[in-house]
Image: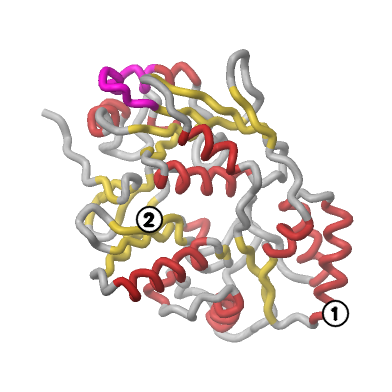
Amino acid sequence: MTTRLDIVLDRFVRVGGAKAIDLADGSQVHLKTVVPGDDRQQRRRAQLAALRSAVRIAGLAPLVDYGVSGRGEWIEAYRFDPQDIHAGCACEPPLPHAAIAALLAQAGCAPPTTRDAGVSETAAAGGHRAAGTIIVRRDELDAVTELLAAPAGAGARSLRIDAPTGAGARTFFEMIAREARLGGFVPLSSVFCGEARAPVPGLDCTTLAAALRDRHVAILDAPGARAPECPRADVARFLSRLDTACGRQHAVIGCGRASAGEAAIALGPMRDDQLRRSLLCTGIDAARLEAAVERALRLSEGWPAAFALHVRRQLGLPGPGRP
């Protein structure tokens, strides 16, 4: 007997009520469901979600994906990983509600309620001098979308992302997950491909392969995000379980150097204008901020993690989240 999975937005497996598991990385998310409105309301909702999904603020649950479900409902998926919601990151405490609201306003998002935005209830009140991050689309993402959109026969195509430390690989794979879903693929972390142990109870490789047998699957082999790197042999075995008789094409996108015959792209430095757009600040003198940005641009040489770190050090703010 095959276990039937409730897969929402071709990415999230509902595990009870509003709780779901993100197949792209194995994290837990909260699904916010809204009854669809008229076309104008839907357009406005989509615009706000696009802005909100690019924002990363300590103490604010990230909006990892959004859209209209197969039932016609508007769905927003907020990640409620304790490391994200309660601590922001390993070195960054959650910001006060007022600071979060100010940063969201600067990003073009109307200040949401605590429930809707996932603001940590433990965040203390007061304090407007703060910084956050806006996820900026990387130029290298075009090569990934071209790979996913290119016509191909049954089987799997492979792409490796060569990303040095501090290049922003973790964030880049978050972008890939949504692009893959929008391109008709189910984004699936390689941690679900292992035979030894299911990373999430009930979501073992056999159950998932059966549930995804008639789908296009993009396996994201991104080491270090939430689990150790999955051996390539496990990925190959999982793909062999999928039915390719009807010409279903799949993709495997990994991190690291490519082997013979694999396509590869290098995740390089970002442009100055991209780094400037990635910075979200409130309560900081404009002249002081500009001086900090200029110095950070010189010191970071285009690497996003270094840029964020240098800016915040000069401004006396806590360190940024994980790239």
Q: Is residue 263 above or below residue 45?
A: above
In the image, the segment drawn in magenta is 237-249
Q: Residue furthest left?
A: 1
Horizontal and vertical percent position of residue 211: 24, 33
Q: Earlier in the sequence, mark 1 or mark 2?
A: 2
Q: Nearer the viewer, mark 1 or mark 2?
A: 1
The three-letter amino acid code for the residue at tag 2 is Val
Report the residue at 77% width, 57% height from top.
307
Label number found at residue 101: none
Indicate left or right for 204 with 88 as reference: left
Do the numbered discs 1 and 2 sit on residues whose CB atoms are within 8 Å? no
Q: Which residue is mark 2?
A: 29
Q: Mark 1 sits on what residue?
A: 287
Which residue type carries mark 1?
Answer: Ala
Q: Position of residue 123 (x, y in %)?
A: 53, 75
Residue located 56% across and 83% down the image: 98
Asked whether 41 or 229 is in front, the reply is 41
| Residue that extends furthest to the top in the rendered view of this protein | 260
* Left or right placement of residue 50 versus residue 211 in this view: right
Q: Residues within 10 Å of mark 2 (few under 14, many from 20)?
A: many
Label tally: 2
Q: Position of residue 206 (x, y in %)?
A: 27, 26
Residue located 55% across and 30% down the image: 254
